[in-house]
Image (cartoon, helix red, strand yellow):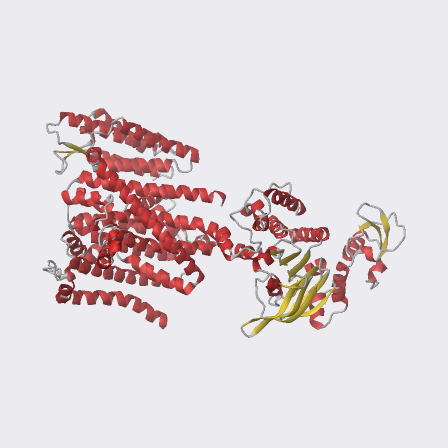
């Protein structure tokens, strides 16, 4: 019971913190005013925090979904016998791609798609594919030889083997890749507001530009809580997926 | 698809061919801030060059149907030839241009083809002897350096941007490196002892790792931002710190935040390294009368070191990328080019910063790979 | 000389070594044998203070081991273990030189000593010095482990089931090496094993342990002929005590004068078990006994095997 209880608490507390911040921050004008009396507008009001959070989650969710579909698809393709010769090239792309800093990917997307949410989404997808892809390949490659031999011996077909043996056994690493992809996306989406995407990065960037530390703190607190919430939820799913496999 | 098909060559040639026929090879912009008009490969003078590129990709596609591994020479030719062609094209276009502010930028088609060529070369050299690999890569780099030296790329917008900002660029590069090295140094100074403590006391270790992985999830810019307040307060109340250049914005919060990120991998890999030391070797060392420090210095450390080095490879690549974000809080570095460029709409500036960051990250990766190879020589 | 004086070591409530006293003479090859969990390894490790004792005292040549700084105590005692514990990042030569280096020997002396040990352990001719441990076979690794333990010419050597993980042929060869080294150097060896055949073959005296106590201490023949209790009889005798006894006695001890030039030959240092095997093989009830040079020393009759002479 304690493990389940602790697991639930691990998800609950960042989410609670996020909810609390979303409710409390807009009402904390006097507090920020008392802290930084020199600011005329101590609370960010251009867009509501709830709307920014929703947009942030939407962007990250969409990007992660696309990343999972692409990463999983390419990863599975590159580990099939017929297309296996592509594996080194796929792996090279995943490894070299991850040395590209997220900011760089974002910056490169701008000239292609202009300002706004589109380049951010592209950057998130491009960058988000890599961890999913890398972990899918690693996960499938690390499936134990005896398990595969046993599946072959029992007369599993190629796709059935993939679906019932390889993917379930690789689910843990793949989920870890999804989690990493989502967390990186949360951070990159934040910077995305520097190229015009509407995310929780907006108060931070605007605060930095106009020297309004209160905005910066508000945005940073929300982003931190959001990131921890998403990580906690995905970590819980990862644990659930790994359960019974190790 | 027949099993005889050379899939990597087929795929990369197809991508190259697609980029060559539909992609933009060069863009002609009236000045560094306005966006340009697209030029396809065969509109770039000298026209012969475009056709040769096209023919090379087609040849690659044709060769992929043969069972034998071909394409090494195609990859080398394209890797070196594409930039040379772009440089030559830019030179001609610029000579014909009416306005002297005209800029010739590299298009998406160029970048995709160039990347495909690089990946092809990487794939073809797999399994080759190390000497051959080294020789060919050295050859490619030397060809680039020689061509660059003799001004073959001088008329490309990217190079012009660099030439115009050479001094600023050098400073930014130096700051970028200093911030990265400072981060690594600080993270090692704190992370190594922390990793050792975590190894000695498992429960404390779990706590340390838990806190650090929580920090890891916070986006870098949020962590930078959250440090501004406390550090500004510290600097206000301790003038001695302020005198050292310590404040709410600038290098101090950048290095502290980056170090917080770097700590998790450093601690985790230190732990993994120490865990990987065979217990019997430690037992034998103690049995032979080594003191605790001698065991640490002569047995545990040398055996844990390669694992830590693998961790440092990840940390340094990650840090180089994150230092770029630190430009937002005034720490400088190559990220300044990126954000200033985005702000002004000056794409060349963005690319200059971005490419330099990527090159730095890849270089760090290579250096650590080489170091790893040297330490694993005996393993 | 190693004296253990009412030594006790507890883990929580249970005493893994229980008020145990023992005296091992200088130059002796003493084997501690017993089932797993009997405390024999623990006892061995208290001698070089890898494990501390709760009560009693351990003295080496009259000096309490706790009075000696632990590092210098261990540097003066060789230590070899089953898992060998070679340092994977150092070459064979560097591994062997570990303790001499800790002791600050000059380089030339270390090099000479390493060469000497390589020859002593029959590792010469295999060009192992500059190789790393992972490139060696299990038997070679253990030879290097023993060489490393012997490197600083220790007066005492502790060996904790050093041959437990080796195949029978390799183990046999290493057991012979240990006997030869012991004869050559006169090092006091305390040898822990759970294999009674190994104990009977190597031990000049054997201490049989169970539950942290010594059931009996004596020569192999004493243990076989006069077991102190039923437990000892069960451990030592096994299924065929008579054959075991033949395996610890030597031809030399029972041969008699005579000539039998046509009979099959047996070595004077062979065990009576080997002699019996030779008789069975050739269908002969008499053997010609010769020494290592081939000189005939006497004869051995089947009836001699049955006589219970020492």
Q: Is residue C125 left or right of residue B7?
A: right
Percent across and percent down for residue A22 are 18, 65
* Number of on-image labels: 0
**Residue ID at (9%, 60%):** A40
Examine the rendering and report whether any part of residue B77 can be seen: no
Percent across and percent down for residue B253 are 26, 54
Percent across and percent down for residue C70 are 57, 60
For this rendering, which residue is in front, A220 or B256? B256
On the rendered image, what quadrant is the C terminus of chain C found in? bottom right
Q: Is residue C128 left or right of residue A110?
A: right
Examine the rendering and report whether any part of residue A47 can be seen: yes
Percent across and percent down for residue B156 are 20, 32
For this rendering, which residue is in front, B91 or B18? B91
For this rendering, which residue is in front, A6 or B33? B33
User: Which of the 4 image quarters holds residue B101?
Assistant: top left
On the rendered image, what quadrant is the N terminus of chain C found in? bottom right
Q: Is residue C51 above or below residue C119?
A: below
Q: Is residue A58 above or below residue B88?
A: below
Furthest-right residue in view?
Answer: C258
User: Which of the 4 image quarters holds residue A21?
Assistant: bottom left
């Amino acid at each position: 019971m304690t493990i389940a209880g602790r697991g639930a608490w691990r998800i609950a507390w960042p989410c609670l913190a996020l909810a609390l911040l979303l409710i409390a921050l807009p009402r904390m004008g006097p507090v920020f005013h008392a802290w930084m009396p020199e600011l005329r507008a101590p609370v960010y009001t251009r867009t509501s925090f709830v709307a920014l959070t929703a947009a942030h989650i939407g962007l990250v969710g969409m990007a992660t979904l696309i990343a999972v579909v692409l990463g999983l698809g390419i990863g599975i393709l590159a580990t099939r016998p017929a297309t296996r010769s592509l594996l080194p090239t796929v792996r090279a792309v995943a490894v070299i791609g991850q040395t590209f800093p997220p900011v760089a990917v974002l910056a490169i997307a701008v000239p292609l798609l202009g300002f706004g949410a589109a380049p951010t989404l592209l950057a998130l997808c491009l960058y988000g594919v890599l961890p999913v892809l890398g972990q899918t390949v690693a996960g499938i490659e690390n499936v134990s030889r005896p398990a595969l031999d046993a599946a072959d011996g029992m007369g599993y077909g190629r796709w059935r083997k993939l679906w019932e043996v390889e993917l379930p056994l690789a689910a843990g690493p793949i989920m870890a890749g999804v989690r990493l992809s989502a967390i990186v996306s949360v951070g990159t989406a934040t910077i995305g507001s520097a190229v015009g995407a509407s995310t929780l990065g907006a108060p931070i960037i605007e605060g930095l530009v106009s020297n309004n530390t209160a905005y910066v703190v508000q945005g940073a607190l929300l982003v931190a809580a959001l990131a921890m919430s998403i990580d906690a939820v995905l970590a819980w799913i990862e644990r659930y997926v790994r359960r019974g496999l190790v | 698809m027949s099993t005889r098909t050379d899939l990597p060559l087929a795929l990369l040639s197809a991508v190259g061919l697609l980029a060559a026929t539909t992609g933009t090879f060069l863009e002609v912009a009236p000045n560094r801030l306005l966006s340009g008009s697209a030029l396809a490969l065969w509109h770039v003078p000298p026209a012969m060059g475009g056709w040769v590129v096209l023919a090379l990709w087609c040849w690659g596609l044709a060769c992929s149907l043969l069972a034998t591994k071909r394409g090494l020479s195609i990859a080398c030719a394209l890797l070196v030839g594409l930039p040379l062609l772009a440089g030559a094209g830019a030179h001609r276009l610029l000579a014909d241009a009416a306005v002297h502010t005209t800029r010739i930028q590299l298009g998406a088609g160029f970048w995709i083809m160039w990347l495909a060529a690089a990946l092809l070369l990487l794939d073809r050299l797999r399994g080759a002897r190390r000497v051959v690999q080294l020789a060919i890569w050295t050859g490619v780099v030397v060809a680039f350096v020689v061509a660059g030296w003799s001004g073959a790329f001088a008329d490309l917008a990217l190079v012009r941007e660099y030439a115009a900002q050479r001094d600023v660029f050098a400073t930014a590069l130096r700051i970028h490196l200093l911030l990265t090295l400072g981060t690594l140094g600080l993270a090692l100074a704190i992370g190594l002892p922390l990793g050792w403590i975590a190894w000695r006391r498992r429960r404390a270790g779990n706590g340390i790792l838990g806190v650090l992985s929580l920090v890891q999830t916070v986006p870098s810019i949020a962590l930078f931002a959250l440090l501004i307040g406390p550090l500004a307060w510290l600097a206000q109340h301790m003038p001695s710190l302020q005198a050292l250049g310590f404040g709410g914005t600038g290098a101090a919060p950048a290095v502290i935040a980056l170090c917080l990120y770097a700590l998790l991998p450093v601690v985790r890999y230190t732990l993994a390294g120490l865990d990987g030391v065979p217990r019997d070797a430690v037992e034998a060392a103690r049995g032979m009368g080594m003191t605790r420090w001698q065991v640490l210095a002569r047995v545990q450390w040398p055996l844990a070191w390669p694992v830590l080095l693998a961790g440092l490879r990840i940390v340094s690549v990650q840090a180089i990328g994150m230092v770029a974000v630190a430009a937002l809080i005034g720490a400088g570095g190559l990220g300044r080019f990126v954000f200033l460029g985005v702000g002004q709409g000056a794409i060349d500036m963005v690319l200059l910063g971005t490419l330099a960051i990527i090159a730095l990250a890849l270089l760090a990766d290579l250096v650590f790979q080489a170091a790893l190879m040297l330490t694993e020589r005996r393993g | 000389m190693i004296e253990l004086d009412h030594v006790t070591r507890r883990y929580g409530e249970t005493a893994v070594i229980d008020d145990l006293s023992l005296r091992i003479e200088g130059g002796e090859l003493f084997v501690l044998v017993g089932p797993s969990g009997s405390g024999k390894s623990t006892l061995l490790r208290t001698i070089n203070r890898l494990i501390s004792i709760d009560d009693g005292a351990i003295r080496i040549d009259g000096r309490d081991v706790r009075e000696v700084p632990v590092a210098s105590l261990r540097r003066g005692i060789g230590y070899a273990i089953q898992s060998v514990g070679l340092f994977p990042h150092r070459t064979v030569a560097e591994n062997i030189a570990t303790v001499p280096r800790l002791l600050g020997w000059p380089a030339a002396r270390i090099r000479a000593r390493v060469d000497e040990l390589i020859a002593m352990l029959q590792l010469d001719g295999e060009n192992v010095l500059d190789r790393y441990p992972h490139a060696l076979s299990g038997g070679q690794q253990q030879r290097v482990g023993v060489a490393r333990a012997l490197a600083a010419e220790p007066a005492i050597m502790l060996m904790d089931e050093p041959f437990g993980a080796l195949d029978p042929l390799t183990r046999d060869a290493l057991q012979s090496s240990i006997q030869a080294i012991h004869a050559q150097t006169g090092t006091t060896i305390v040898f822990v094993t759970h294999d009674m055949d190994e104990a009977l073959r190597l031990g000049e005296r054997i201490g049989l342990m169970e539950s942290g106590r010594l059931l009996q201490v004596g020569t192999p023949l004493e243990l076989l002929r006069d077991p102190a209790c039923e437990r000892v009889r069960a451990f030592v005798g096994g299924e065929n005590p008579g054959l075991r006894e033949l395996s610890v006695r030597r031809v030399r001890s029972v041969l008699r004068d005579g000539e039998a030039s046509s009979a099959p030959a047996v070595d004077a240092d062979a065990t009576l078990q080997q002699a019996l095997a030779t008789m069975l093989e050739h269908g002969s009830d008499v053997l010609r006994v010769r020494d290592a040079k081939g000189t005939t020393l006497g004869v051995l009759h089947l009836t001699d095997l049955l006589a219970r002479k020492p």
